[in-house]
Structures are given as C-alpha cells and as structure tokens.
Amino acid sequence: MFNNPDLLLLHAPSVYDFRKTPVLFGPISDVVPSTPAFEMYPLGFSNLAEALAAEGMSVRIYNLAYRMLKDRGFDVEKRIRSFKPAAFGIDLHWLVHAHGALAVAAMCKRFHPEIPVVFGGLSSSYFHRELAARPEADYVLRGDSVESSLAALVRAVKQGRRDMHGIPNLTWKDGFGRVVENPMECPPEVLDRSRNLYLTLFRMAARYMDPFSMTAIHDWWRYPVTCVLTFRGCKRNCAFCGGSGQAFRKFYGRDRTGYRPAALVVRDVREIARFTGAPIFIIGDPLEPGREWCEELLAGLEAAAIENHVAVELYRPAEEWFYDRLAGAVRAFNVEISPESHDDGIRRACGKGYAMEEVERNIRFAMDRGCNRFDLFFMTGLPMQDRKSVMDTVSYCSDLMSRTPKEVIPFISALTPFLDPGSPIFEDPESHGYTRFLSTLEEHRKALEEPSWEFIMNYETRWMTRRDIAEVTYQAGIAMNDAKHRSGRISTEQRDAVRANAELGLRLLAEIRGIREIRDSGERNRRLMALKPDMDKAGISSVCDKSEFRWPTINRDFRFLEIMKAILTGS
C-alpha cells in the first residue's frame, strides 16, 4: 500500500538528469534556500495533501529532486516503476522546472501509461493548453486554489470516469485527443481552509516510513526553517513578477487577493512552534491585508509567546508603528525587503515606487528595536540598468554597511534564469526595454539543455546583453563580498571561497562560449563533460556564501516527543 496512494505528488529537479548533464547553473540559486537542482517543492504541496486528506484520500509527497541530490546513485526509473497511485501529480510552478518536470512526467507515462498525470502550478497554468496537448500530460489544473478541483478529479479517476467537463479549472484531452478547457471557478477571497501546520507532512513520513522524501530543502534536517502563507494573489504589479496582480487577473482567474484570517496564521505559527524551535517565515507582507489585519496578527503572536525567531518580508517600507508592534509581539525578528537597485528610477521602472531613503529609515526603525537581521536583495538584469549601475549598487551597499550594524546584510544576484511568464515584462518586453528570446514551454525546456546560464536566460535588455548580465553578476558578487569582509560581516575564508567560485564561473563562461561553437557534437560533449566538476563547484556560493542566507537562531532542534504525540492523537 505504501506505493499505492490515491495521489502521488512528485517534485522533479530543474534539469533531468543534473547529476550527469554538464550545466553551469551559476548563481541562480545562491539567494534562495535550495541548490541549483531547485529541490524545494512549492508550499502548495502540503496544502493539497491536507485538503485531500480531509476528503478521505491518501496523498504522498515524493521529492525526487531531493533524493537525487542526496544519493548520486539513486535509481529514479526503478522508483517510478514501483509506484502505483491512482494519479501522479507533478508541479510546474516555477518555470525553471520545465525540463525536469516534463522528463519525470514522460517517465511516468512510459512505465504506467494507464495512470493519468496531473500538472499544476503557475507555469502550468500559463502554458496550460500547450502542456495539455503534450503526451506527458493528461490533465492541467489552472490557478492558485485548486484543492476542490483536484479532489474532484482524483475521485473521477478512481471511478473510471472519462468525461471531465464538470470539473472547474481543468484543461484536459477528450477521447479524440482534443484539448478541452473547462471554465475557471472564482477562487476564494477568504482562505479559511488552508493550513500550514506541517502535521500532515509528519503523518506522511510516519505512514510511509519515509521521513526524507517529504523533505523540501537539502539541509532541512539541520536547519528546519518553516513557512506560513498569509495570502494568495497580489495587488501590486512588479514588472518582472509572474505573481503580479496583472498576471493573476489575466491568467490565473484571481481578480482579488485572497487573505487568510489572521487568527489562522497565528494558529499555524503556534502549532509549528510545538514541533521545532527553528525560525518561522511568514510569507507575504503582513501589511498587505491592511493595518487592522496586521494588528490582529501581531496581537495573536504576542499572546502565543513563542520562542522561535520570526521572519517577515516587506513589499515596501513600513511605518514606525509596525516595528514597535513587531518587536513587542515576538522574542526575535528578522526582516527582508527587495529594493532591487539603489537607484530610485530603476526601482520605479520595476514597479516599486518607493525611495531608498525610506528603506534606510526602516533599517533604523528595525535595528533600534532589536531586529535580529535585516536582509536587502538587489538584482542584475533590470530595466534601465547597465554595468555601471550594477557596480554603483555595490558601492552603495558598501557605504550602507559602513554605517549600519553588522546585522544589516545586502545580497545581489541575477534576474535569472527566466523572466516569469505572465509578468508585465514577459507580456510586453519591448516597452520595458527587453528582448525576449523564448515564448513557448518547449522553448524554455530546450533552453535548460544549454551548458551555461548565460544561454539559458530567456532575455536581454536594451542596456545589457546576456553576456553583460552574466559577467557583471559575478563581478558584483566579488565586489559585494569584499565589502562584506571589510565591514566584518563575513570571514576571510568565506570571502576567498566566494571569490574563487565567481572567478571560476567567469572563466567557465568564456570556455563554454568557445565550446558551443564546435561543430562536432561528440567533441563538444566531451569537452563539456570535462568541465562538469568545475561547473558543479561554481554552481554554489558564487555571489555569496550560501550559509549567509540562514537566519540566526537560538534553537533549531526538533521536538520529537511533541511530533509523535501529534501523530498519534491527530492534534
């Protein structure tokens, strides 16, 4: 029964098989928790598992990317062949998974042609008609709130039904191979059914006697950071974001942001704190639902009196009262914000209309109230940004670090590998000063077979070519890390390791350009394979030390007695 759940949710790596394929991924994952394999599956997996469990169905999450990353000898084909679920579910949420997700789906169909494959996620939704027409896919669920549609689909599959016309949000092939697009159902504006308690994952680990396949991040067992979602959708229109309000309205059926009641967010935080002392990340700016909602959240957190560090993200600078209330509500807090550039004009072109002066004021508000860490994220490849502007951002950050506490930490990386489908820039690149090279899902899948992230990128700008963006990203990383070292934020060993990886990345960019010009495919592949060990080395910590991304914490241990009690009692 362990391999025969009603729904088996599979998470594929970005590129299949990254263990054998020579690809210089570059810094594309340096400022996110996962590795270049992008082994972190979407938070929606646990929401779907929870929702279907409430309908009496069995669901198993199996993180193939994590298994492949941790065990270089792991036999994916043997594992897929052993499964016999009623349906396979594969996420194609981030477009970086276009290669791996389709390869794993094809494997499922090869070994189990009678078992349907269901795709979901924002990228699946955007490319739903193209995806549904492919032989690897039977069904595509569109939008961000498909729990009820997925439950209806799995029930129909188990009953042997062929006609799926009555299931909203579904794109599918009928008996003649024609793609059918069912109407979209308005998603809920009050998200009072979703949960992020992690109890479902712990139960799953116990039921299938497999605590590792549900693991979302490569080092989660050593640093079990958890996440709590506050809302779905967005009312903002950042130019490069596929989760913008424009994208949700046009492609994902959501006209209004759907918010979770603040009391349920507090409940999730309180319950997670039973199981681990690691940091809890509240995803989504808590000020977006309005001050009243935010005040209720902070009052609830204060009453919960948890010991965990709490991290929040801001979409724009907050007012001073927010930091007063946040500092009083939790034992320790971390803040992150993404100004993208030091240049206010570039930031406005990105759709963010605030000034760097406001960000600096927020830093003062936060640090005066004992903020544990304040992270700032900057990018390369932005509208109106040239090489000089990128390096000017690093100079600004160097000056900022010289006059702020060591807990203020800036990062810089590239807008890569892809412009998000559905984002304002993707939909209208010319007006933003961009050239977009790729349009279809298949084109993006094939791009991920390129040997270097320089050629994987689906865009360049009026101000920088792909080569410019790749090179200046490494150069900015070197300069940023030198500045961090001068200010005492990183050790000499960290600075030297990042510099070595960045310089290796720059050298590999040049070598790969030359190898791509070799006409003999055998010789080209031989030379690329010879570079693979260096490619893998340069794929981690090439613009910042990966460990910098971890929030500091006092206690990150699991409370296994509480976990076992919750599994046995169901609460």
Image (tube, rainbow, N blue to C red):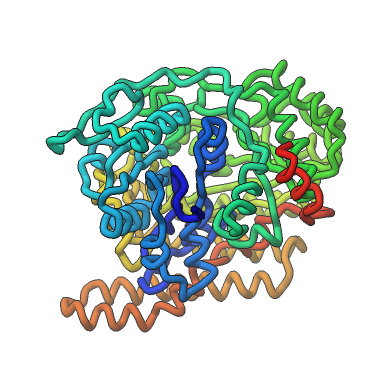
Which sits in the foreground, 260 or 523? 260
Going by the picture, which residue comes out furthest to the left? Answer: 176
The answer to whether one can see residue 406 in this image is no
Displayed quadrant of residue 425: top left
Q: Residue 528's quadrant in the figure?
A: bottom left
Asked if residue 414 lies left or right of residue 510, the reply is: right
* 382 left or right, relative to 156: right
Screen quadrant of the C terminus: top right
Q: Where is residue 345 in the image (x, y as percent from the top left)?
A: 50, 35
Q: Where is residue 420 in the image (x, y as percent from the top left)?
A: 39, 41
> In screen coordinates, is 211 left or right of 391?
right
Residue 250 visible in the displayed image: yes
Count the labels in the image: 0
Tell me which residue sits at (22%, 73%) in the image.
Answer: 517
Residue 243: x, y in percent? 46, 34
Query: Residue visible at 69% across and 38% down?
Result: 312
Q: In this view, does 111 lie above or below 505?
A: above
Give the residue drawn at x 51%, y 74%: 537
Q: In this view, does 391 lie above or below 523?
A: above
Q: In which quarter of the image is residue 111?
A: bottom left
**Residue 265, horizontal then vertical, whole percent:** 69, 29
